[in-house]
Image (cartoon, coloured by chain):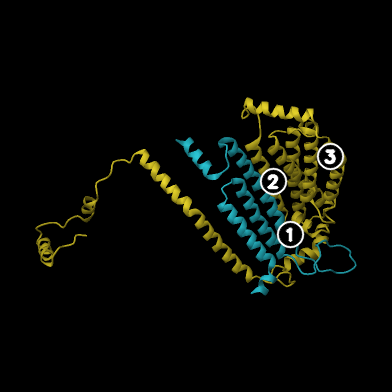
């Protein structure tokens, strides 16, 4: 059991990070902190993906005339992580912009307070 | 259901029904009759208290449910993770023939020694096109939400902004300004280096573009919006942003066309140009986010 955890240490760390981020996303009342939780979840996924492509003793996949034939790591997960980071940045920026607008409109970014104020305005 | 009190009356009823003396009671009608009479519409106050009660209950149970869901999810994920192949082994299922092909023929087929660049700009170029579009749209969406113009800015905001600008103009941050004066050229130089060496060394459009955007942000923060407008105003920004994306689409279209029709590719360094286009898009995105969040206008 312990051996398995040690062998898959990056994946286990990713799962723990994902849990922390998910908990933040669900339980925090502050919208900004929710976004932070979301970003922690993103990082967990990136960590998992990036660690999948690593090969022990491998070098960065820059093929060239090195005079020897090294073991390269897998380039595919790196490219996928790049895609993920771009999407994560975009989503973060968009949600932050939304939060700024919410703050300008209602004067708060605490979720329950926000719901109360929005409900009062509806009446 | 119509429950008869005794067997006798049940038998009598059946006999009556068989004889045709009386119809059995219509069940649906009977149910309707048994319903309690409808209440009059509840008052608003009643509704409000009920809503409040419901919300209260929700608030009490929400954390418990959230923790339970999270723990269940983590349990499932952990169970999945523990059965994964060992970290760092060369014969893991993820290291299949696709990665081998990229590593073996990447340099020959795309002319780019950095296999990650070769992959994201040639083999998976449509994916990167999608990414560029996502960035473009993200800036457009943030612009829609935060851009300040005559319609959505009232007098108060305008005055506040002008006051802040006046304070900044009267008391410039000397340390920041001097540091930026020294640093900005080197940041741009480094950005160009990373952009142009994306094929043969770590780097490429995304990292180089981010550095370029960071240089723009540093310049804008040090010298203020007025000076920045000389270098890049709203029109120019929009033009550069669109130009990057259109350049990417055009170049990649040509690239795909040449490759699909087995035509010889005389345009060496095509990936380099595509890299530059991606860099432009990314730099504009990073700088645009900064400007829109800090001031709301260019």
Question: Disc 2: which chain?
Answer: B
Where residue B243 sits, quadrant-wise, is top right
For marks 2 and 3, the one nearer the N-term is 2
Characterize the local packing of mark 1: few (<14), some (14-19) or many (20 or more) Cα atoms within 10 angstroms. many
Q: Residues within 10 Å of mark 2 (few under 14, many from 20)?
A: many
Q: Viewer-nearest of labels 2 and 3?
A: 3
Q: Distance between the residues labelled 2 and 1?
A: 19 Å
- Residue A41, numbered label: none
Q: Which of A107 and A94 is in front in this view?
A: A107
Q: Is residue B177 above or below residue A58?
A: above
User: Residue B170: which quarter of the image?
Assistant: top right
Q: Is residue A118 visible?
A: yes
Which mark, by number, is residue A78? 1
Q: Mark 3 points at which residue?
A: B180
Q: Distance between the residues labelled 3 and 1?
A: 33 Å
Looking at the picture, how far across and down is residue A20, in whole percent?
Answer: 62, 58
The chain coloured cyan is A
Q: Which residue does the numbered mark 2 point to in the structure image? A: B135
Q: Give the chain of mark 1.
A: A
In the displayed structure image, the side of residue B124 where residue B9 appears, left or right:
left
Element assignment for label 2? helix
Q: Identify by letter the chain in yellow.
A: B
């Amino acid at each position: 059991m312990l051996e398995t955890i040690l062998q898959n240490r990056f994946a286990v760390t990713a799962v723990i990070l994902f849990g922390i981020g998910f908990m933040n996303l669900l339980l925090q009342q502050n919208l900004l902190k929710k976004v932070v939780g979301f970003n922690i979840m993103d990082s967990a996924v990136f960590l998992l993906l990036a660690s999948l492509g690593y090969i022990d003793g491998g070098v960065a996949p820059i093929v060239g005339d090195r005079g020897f034939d090294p073991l390269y790591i897998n380039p595919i997960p790196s490219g996928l992580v790049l895609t993920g980071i771009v999407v994560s940045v975009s989503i973060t920026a968009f949600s932050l912009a939304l939060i700024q607008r919410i703050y300008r409109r209602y004067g708060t970014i605490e979720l329950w307070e926000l719901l109360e104020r929005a409900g009062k305005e509806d009446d | 259901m119509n429950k008869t009190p005794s067997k006798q009356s049940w038998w009598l009823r059946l006999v009556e029904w068989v004889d045709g003396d009386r119809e059995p009671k219509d069940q649906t009608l009977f149910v309707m009759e048994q319903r309690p009479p409808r209440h009059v519409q509840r008052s608003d106050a009643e509704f409000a208290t009920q809503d409040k009660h419901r919300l209260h209950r929700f608030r009490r149970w929400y954390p418990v449910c959230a923790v339970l869901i999270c723990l269940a999810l983590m349990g499932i994920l952990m169970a999945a993770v523990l059965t994964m192949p060992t970290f760092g082994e060369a014969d893991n299922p993820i290291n299949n023939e696709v990665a081998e092909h990229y590593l073996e023929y990447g340099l020959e087929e795309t002319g780019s020694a950095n296999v990650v660049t070769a992959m994201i700009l040639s083999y998976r170029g449509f994916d990167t096109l999608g990414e560029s579009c996502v960035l473009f749209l993200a800036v457009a969406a943030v612009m829609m939400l935060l851009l300040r113009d005559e319609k959505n800015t009232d007098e108060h905001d305008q005055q506040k902004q002008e006051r802040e600008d006046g304070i900044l103009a009267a008391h410039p941050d000397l340390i920041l300004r001097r540091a930026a004066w020294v640093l900005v050229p080197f940041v741009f130089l480094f950005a160009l280096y990373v952009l142009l060496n994306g094929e043969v060394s770590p780097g490429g459009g995304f990292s180089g573009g981010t550095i370029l955007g960071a240089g723009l942000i540093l310049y804008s923060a040090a010298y203020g919006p007025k000076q920045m407008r000389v270098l890049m105003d709203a029109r120019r920004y929009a033009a550069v942003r669109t130009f990057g994306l259109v350049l990417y689409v055009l170049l990649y279209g040509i690239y795909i066309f040449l490759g699909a029709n087995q035509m010889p590719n005389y345009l060496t360094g095509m990936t380099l140009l595509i890299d530059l286009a991606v860099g432009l898009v990314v730099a504009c995105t990073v700088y645009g986010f900064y400007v829109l969040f800090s001031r709301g206008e260019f």
